Amino acid sequence: MTGQPLWLQSSPVRELLNMLVDRLDAAERRGSSKAQSVALGERTWPALYKAHRESEKEGLWQHVTEMARWGWLAVKPEVAVRSRSGYASLPRVTVSDEAAVRTVVGRTERVKSAAERWRDAVYVGLQASDDIKAVVSEFCIDMPDRSMAEVVERLNELPALADRPMLLREVSSQLFWGMSKVLDKRQGLVAALLGADECPFPESPIQLQVFLPPTGYRGVLFIENLMSFERATRSKSPAFEGLALVYASGFKGSAQRLRTPDGCSLFYSARGGISQNLRDDFEAWLFGKVTKPAYFWGDLDWAGMRILAAMRTSFPGLTAFEPGYTSMLAALSEGRGHSSEAADKQGQKAITATGCAYADEQLLPALRSSSRFVDQEQVTSAECHALALSSGFKAF
């Protein structure tokens, strides 16, 4: 048809046609050759059904009947096409001429999702069996400024690195133009390409900063925030007496590889003891050869409690550090906490239990009732000192 009328480009008509093309795209993604008919109503075509004047509704419906006369659309029941108010008879519309409808809205082909494009690139370009392609196609890699075909071409070079003693991020950096994190959480892809049961390249070791009391220690305290860790290493408070102090931010401390010699890198503070005996003793505990009491101290918020729960999977028996958290509970009761919005923490999700009795009976109820958080840095060593003295807290 030549000389298309201007109303085809009007917002209400384009709203209808784009909705119909969306349905065509969805049908194609499902593998269906044809989209089902669409019931017209306020949800599917609000421009018509929410119009205030009947004359406006009749005018829009006339456009539908015109497109049906051209053979673009099919309308059921057929009597609706012959009525000025056919829109009121619960009509259903089906696209009859897909090419014409797609052309008028400028969507001649469905835009494939990243997952679909990745699958196509893998099956076309990967030098592997169909079974391996099926596995690799589940690990979509969508990199900015690089086509998926280029990424797959680089994956073909992976077997040449199989026998090299490299970390996973080193392999990623060498394959993908210096991008070191592309293969993070994609060990299954690597294993499939190499025909191995598991990925042969280890993850990057977790770095731990460790302060060992020169006179020895009988327990270990993980501290989430760097400033609080530094304060504790300088503190003379009995709250930290006899404790090795470890800084491990966020969820790093929950990684299982932390408890293996190849999974972590240890950096000992020169302010503390650095004798071989002290270090050997700490590493014997860290790698599971001996047992010691262990504690965690972080922010009093939902994320901090989730870290505590996660770390207990790697360090069974780990508990919340009472002198630190008691100080934070006092801050909450004195109104010194902050709202989640004030610290950009509104996305944190509540946790029902950590497995630590003190946290579950004291800390979680306080968070629920107050709806406020306390940052670890807010608590001074002096406050921990006073509470340790008043409570008689002993770490062991």
Image (cartoon, rainbow, N blue to C red):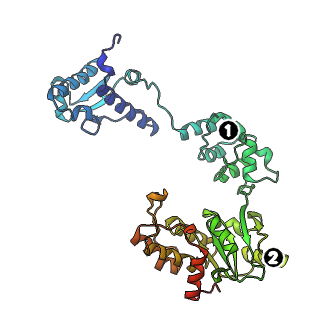
- Which of the numbered marks, if any, corresponds to residue 152? 1
Q: Which residue is mark 2?
A: 280
In the image, residue 380 lies at what x, y percent?
58, 73
Left/right of residue 323 with respect to residue 42 in the rendered view: right
Task: Please say whether residue 107 is visible from this viewpoint.
Answer: yes
Furthest residue to the front?
A: 382
Secondary structure category for the residue under label 2: helix
Q: Nearer the viewer, residue 188 or 33?
A: 188
The residue located at (52%, 78%) in the rendering is 326
Quarter of the rendering occupied by the N terminus? top left
Residue 345 in view, yes or no: no
- Amino acid type of disc 1? Val
Instruction: Find residue 281 and report its horizontal and vertical position in percent.
Output: 78, 79
Residue at the extreme top: 3
Q: Amino acid at mark 2?
A: Asp
Quarter of image, res 33:
top left
Q: Is residue 91 left or right of residue 377?
A: left
Left or right of residue 369, residue 227 in this image: right
Q: Position of residue 243 (x, y in %)?
A: 69, 79
* Badge 1 element: helix
**Which label is found at residue 217?**
none
